[in-house]
Amino acid sequence: MIHTVLEVLTKELNQFLKQRTRMTPNETAVVLSALMDNADGAFAVETENQVICTLFNIEQERSNLNAPTRSNAVVNPPFNLNLYVLFAAYYKKDRYIEALKAISYTIAFFQGKQVFTSANTPSLPANIEKVVVEMVNIEMKDISNFWTTLGAKHLPSIMIKVRMLSITSDLVMEETTPILSVDTTAAIK
């Protein structure tokens, strides 16, 4: 499910950037990939001059954990997730202006399309009702730790929070008998 949502976002952003930057149809503007290769510390993608989309963190949305269910089956509630996704412009040093343009266009894309539904995004899987995105601010004091954690030097980038991706396995824990009526007279003596 996570991979599908990120593939859809990457594909949509790729089309948007290609239109804005006048790339050829066989060029790739955005790639879904790890940012760094953990084995040797090099960038995980070989081709420069593109935006790298990478999953940075997953957080459980805990605000609706006790939502009531209307079923006679006992199931665990779904995990509602927030994804933190980094979009980093990996460009040659002599193309820094192009990297800034790519990040500016990426911001413009997510500002213009903050809600993804099956109506405005046909490639969104049927089991995903809606995906909402918002830009995440990273405090200046945390920037160094952020890039150190990634194992990279600073790149022009933005962090996007993808909200409320719901994952459930529909694993039934037990079956219960539905309550059809309440007998209030039996308790009175």
Image: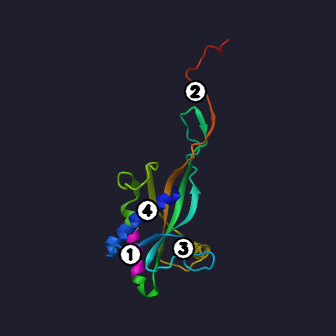
Q: Quadrant of residue 18?
A: bottom left
Disc 1 is placed on an element classified as: loop
Is 104 included in the stretch rendered in magenta?
Answer: yes
The amino acid sitting under disc 1 is Glu
> Which of these two is toward me, 24 or 140?
24
Residue annotated with mark 2: 178
Disc 3 is placed on an element classified as: loop
Q: Earlier in the sequence, mark 3 or mark 2?
A: 3
Residue annotated with mark 1: 27
Range drawn in magenta: 98-106
Label ID, residue 9: 4
Q: Main secondary structure of the magenta part?
A: helix
* Above or below, 137 relative to 68: below
Residue annotated with mark 3: 35
Label 1 vs label 2: CA separation? 57 Å
Question: Which residue: 55% across, 37% down?
Answer: 69
Q: Earlier in the sequence, mark 1 or mark 2?
A: 1
Q: Earlier in the sequence, mark 4 or mark 2?
A: 4
The amino acid sitting under disc 4 is Leu
Q: Earlier in the sequence, mark 1 or mark 3?
A: 1
